Amino acid sequence: MHCKVLIAGAGHGGLATAYHLAKNGVQVTVLESSSLYAMGLDQPDSVNLDCFEKADIPVPEEYVKLRTPITLCCNDDTTPDITQVVPPDGYTVFIERKILCQYLIGLAMEVGVNIVFNTKITGPIIFGSRVCGVHTEKGDYFADIVIDSCGVNSPLKTNLPEKFLINSTISQFDILHTYRAFYNKIPDCPETEPYKVYVFEDGNIGMQWIITNDDDVDVLIGRFNPYQEEDTTHTIESLKRENPQLGNRLIRGGHVTDIPVRQPLSILVADGYAAIGDCAFMTYSIKGSGVGYAMQAGRILADTILADKDELFTAQSLWSYQVNFFKEIGKNASIIALGKVLLTMLTTEDVAYLLKENIINQKIIDASATKNGLVNLITDSGVNTIKDKMLRFFDNKELQKKLRSITVWLAKLLPILNSLPEDYVREDVKKWADKYDSFYNSIRYENNNFDDSDNLL
Ligand SMILES: Cc1cc2nc3c(=O)[nH]c(=O)nc-3n(C[C@H](O)[C@H](O)[C@H](O)COP(=O)(O)OP(=O)(O)OC[C@H]3O[C@@H](n4cnc5c(N)ncnc54)[C@H](O)[C@@H]3O)c2cc1C
């Protein structure tokens, strides 16, 4: 191939794409705003190992650490905590983000990718209906295709005219504003569960975790509303009451960053343009996994670009990236996004009821930690077990009303997902995207008006 590929932002998805393309002889340049050594958040990430296999990227074995067990805490003083057993297959592991970034950069450079650091992109260069390059603070760069890997607040995606059909709207509950910090560990405190997740704080939607490591204590606070500094003070004080090992001295981190927690973008491609990673909302809303799915999408995108022998890189020739992404990742991610919408409707009492009545129990939490655990558990459970859970669930009318909506949503969403056009015809693709986007807007509306939405069915 003689084309020039420009990757905007050295995110996981962009670097994976760059690696596969350059390995196949394509000329690739990555533009990144950070310096080489400032790359990546200073934190460990939880990553599913099979994502490396699916992304066709070797696992950095020497940097992988087994994850500690997660304990779910309801924080209402009466509901017992529930701890997930870590599966022995090491399916989910911890990898330091900074190390993973350097590892991916190393892989890409080894196969000839040119990475230009300290270069901030300010917007796309557009000729007619095609993206032809990017403006940066240091000048313009032109290319045959631009891959947008600039993360959730990408200056490319947000500056594309409407005719490109890339929807850049971000609504409330699409983003979790997240504070992550590591504090000193106070020695000789009573033993506690190593990884506690609190799903509510004072009845408000959001979450926080506290992970007690050998040398420090890792705190994450996630809020759907804009993050306030008081959130940190208040939440740290409340965590300290139950976790006296949490010290006051900040060791690393301490920044607020955004995690997308919504369905993937409806259209990922335009003429001369493809979106990847957080920029295209490629996370599973409740589980996270954005690192792994961005890398996997990188392999899919590289395959699509390599298959375009005429090097046209139009929305039409890039469309199989979207189709294959939805087959491998996007369809499940869109379904799981319904769970996030549901979570925003639940109260502390609802979650406490599900745990106390054994509707959500140890078996379910453990199964969710393994590869096909939940599906196997449902298949292996006898009809009586499922019936018994349903009966207890139906005893709670308020909760029933909320959870009932998910079956209605599923019935509406599945036909939309199954009708994603296999071939690119602009009008058909636009119609599909409108249906997909309108569906999620409509359930957001239902959610905001839940109190008077008895007639959901
Ligand atoms: C606190 C926190 C905890 C998380 N924990 C996990 C976890 O445990 N597991 C997991 O899988 N995921 C986790 N995620 C999600 C994960 O970070 C993302 O899903 C993942 O990084 C997506 O990668 P990406 O390819 O979109 O690129 P990103 O990681 O978003 O990187 C974008 C890159 O683009 C660069 N860039 C941005 N703007 C410009 C610009 N204007 N010009 C040039 N370069 C630019 C940035 O510097 C950056 O290098 C977490 C996120 C946060 C915030």
Image (cartoon, rainbow, N blue to C red):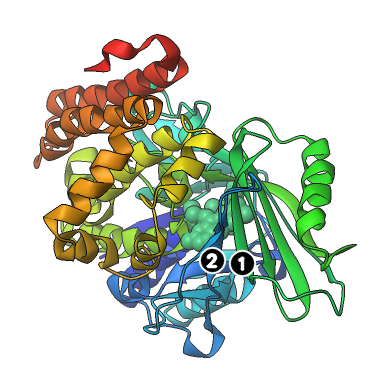
Q: Nearer the viewer, residue 118 or 44?
A: 44
The answer to whether residue 42 is above or below residue 95 is: above
Amino acid type at circle 2 is: Ile
The answer to whether residue 327 is above or below residue 338 is: below
The answer to whether residue 410 is above or below residue 307 is: above
Q: Where residue 83 sits in the image (x, y, percent)?
A: 51, 66
Q: Residue sitting at 40 percent across and 34 percent down?
A: 342
Q: Residue sitting at 71 percent across and 36 percent down?
A: 227
Report helix, strand or loop for mark 1. strand
Amino acid type at circle 1 is: Tyr
**Residue receiving disc 2:** 70
Q: Nearer the viewer, residue 159 or 392?
A: 392
Query: Quarter for ligand 1?
Result: bottom right
Which quadrant, please, contains the N terminus? Answer: bottom left
Q: Nearer the viewer, residue 48 or 12?
A: 48
Report helix, strand or loop for mark 2. strand
Mark 1 neighbour class, 10 Å CA radius: few under 14, some 14 to 19, many 20 or more: many
Furthest residue toward right = 249
Give the left or right position of residue 124, taking residue 52 as reference.
Answer: right
Q: Of the two numbered discs 2 and 1 on the same chain, state the one appearing first in sequence.
A: 2
